[in-house]
Image: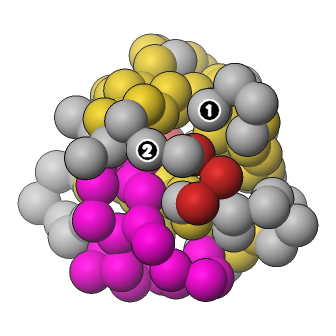
Amino acid sequence: QVQLVESGGGLVQAGGSLRLSCAASGRTFSSLTMAWFRQAPGKEREFVAGINRSGGTTNFADSVKGRFAISRDNAKNTVDLQMNSLKTEDTAVYYCAAGIVWYASIWASSYVYWGQGTQVTISS
């Protein structure tokens, strides 16, 4: 079993930045592929960014490429999402996810463990 706890959400103005962090426990962190998803009101959960076990490969949704960065620290069991140039359409609940897959899949079904989510609100 893996426990994931997100932090760092909040309210910022458009154009600003936020850094989300996810702390994992319960399983060897370096064996997990990690990802961030988000879900806006009335919309389906969507992939935002993913990072493979070693941190050597990342994957981003087209909507966040060039604005968001994902990183992990296998010594600290954490994965971070740095979000820059935020837009109102980035408003959503952001979820950390962990999976036992070889690559940073964009599909939610690839991830077994999920955090509770953290709210990110971008004001205009």
| Residue 118 in sight from this viewpoint | yes
Residue 112 location, quadrant: bottom left
The image shows residue 11 at horizontal and vertical percentages of: 46, 16
Left or right: 122 with respect to 65?
left
Query: Residue at left 63%, top 82%?
Result: 103
Q: Secondary structure at mark 2?
A: loop
Residue, disc 1? 77
- 40 in magenta: no
Classify 10 Å Cα crowding around label 2: few (below 14), some (14-19), many (20 and above). few
Q: Secondary structure at mark 1?
A: loop
Of labels 2 and 1, the one closer to you: 2
Q: Is the residue 67 above or below the residue 61 in the image?
A: above
Residue, disc 2? 27
Q: Mark 2 or mark 1, which has the lower sequence index?
A: 2
The image shows residue 39 at horizontal and vertical percentages of: 28, 55
Classify 10 Å Cα crowding around label 1: few (below 14), some (14-19), many (20 and above). some
The image shows residue 26 at horizontal and vertical percentages of: 37, 36
| Residue 14 in sight from this viewpoint | no
Q: Is the residue 64 above or below the residue 2 in the image?
A: below
Q: Indicate the amino acid at tag 1.
A: Asn
The image shows residue 55 at horizontal and vertical percentages of: 81, 59
Q: Which residues are magenta?
A: 90-114
